[in-house]
Amino acid sequence: MKKHNFSAGPCILPHSVFKEASAAVLDFNNSGLSILEISHRSKDFVNVMEEARSLVLDLLQLKNKGYQALFLHGGASTQFLSVAYNLLEKKAAYLNTGTWSSKAIKEAKMFGEIVEVGSFKDKSFSYIPKKYSIDRSYDYFHCTSNNTIYGTQIKKFPQIEIPLVCDMSSDIFSRQLDFSQFDLIYAGAQKNMGPAGTTLVVVKESILGKVTRKIPSLLNYQIQIEKESMFNTPAVYAVYVSLLNLRWLQSLGGIKAIEEINEKKAQLFYSEIDINPLFKGYAAKEDRSTMNATFNLEDNKLEPLFNQLLEEANINGLNGHRSVGGYRASMYNALPLSSVETLVEVMSELERKA
Ligand code: PMP
């Protein structure tokens, strides 16, 4: 029986995507060949890559606005250094909102001066700092739109006159934003885009070519654009499954449609957190993530009973990140509302039984 999968990533994808993806392993496009054995230079795969790159720009409403979409290797973590390699000449501003921003800062420091604006380690990253300003002396400003571990999400991005770079690994394609306010967006695929193994980079071409250092080819966005994301063998299967997932999103009505569903799921979950006295939410209310809801039991003695009820209800992946503990319900695009209903029922059952 399919489990309710609240895993933080890799995570649930639509069942129709699993089915299509598995069929292509046996026979891709009636070619008599598996997707796993075809050349990445074959026409069939070149079409996959082209459609995937184009669909990303369509869904983000960035077509004909000077942007390019790339499917690269190395996870979002490689982008922590690629961003700096390609854009950092002297100094950059970073908003530190948690573990992933801290890691991005660590890598970027190897390339220039990094100024942390609005940092707030005192509060255990439970809210998004809002009082900071960024002047034109920086090469770019970097932020993390959704903090997968702490469960906070930036709702409003600063208006700035320098390139805006954003790690959207855990909330890309989940909500409507004016994506043209960003100059570079990156995201590991393994949440809302597809399986692990490829990383999306969406970049405005006009910000490139400004640094004086030499950039290794594989990490050079301009070379990747020139080579149409095929500088070397791409992650063929991960890109293909991402395409299936992006098609699914488009057929549902795109980001506008999924945003409505995501808001319903988040509202249902957080209203239970707010009325059930056994639980407390981790993140500040105004900064609560619609993707990753972090919470704790008021009384840890109830943990064995809660865990037992979760297991009986076929719920998977609710543990908090190993660095913070507690619980985390990840409600990515493909997680059905019915899974959140089941979780909320278990939480009220605990209240009745405790
Ligand atoms: N940024 C964010 C916001 C993430 O959630 C993650 C992974 N969970 C990463 C970066 C790192 O991604 P990867 O494992 O693809 O390098």
Image: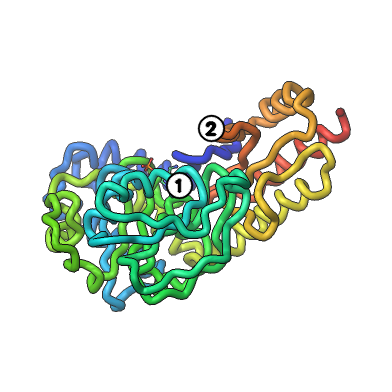
Instruction: Please identify the quadrant where the C terminus is shown.
Output: top right
Instruction: Left or right? Give the position of 242 relative to 32.
Output: right
The local crowd at label 2, few if under 14, some if 14 to 19, many if 20 or more residues have their Cα within 10 Å, is few
> In what element is the residue under mark 2?
loop
Quadrant where ligand 1 appears: top left
- Identify the residue at image location x=60%, y=46%: 122
- Identify the residue at image location x=53%, y=32%: 323
Q: Compute the Cα span from label 2 to label 1.
A: 19 Å
> In what element is the residue under mark 1?
loop
Q: Up-down: is 108 above or below 55?
A: above
Instruction: Left or right? Give the position of 192 relative to 22.
Output: right
Establish whether ligand 1 lies closer than 8 Å to the Cβ of label 1: yes
In x, y percent, where is residue 306? Answer: 74, 28
Q: Earlier in the sequence, mark 2 or mark 1?
A: 1
Q: Is residue 93 visible?
A: yes
The disc labelled 2 sits on which kind of residue?
Answer: Ser
* Residue, disc 1: 191
* Residue, disc 2: 323
Q: Which of these two is toward me, 252 or 111?
A: 111
Q: Is residue 333 visible?
A: no
Instruction: Please identify the quadrant where the N terminus is shown.
Output: top right
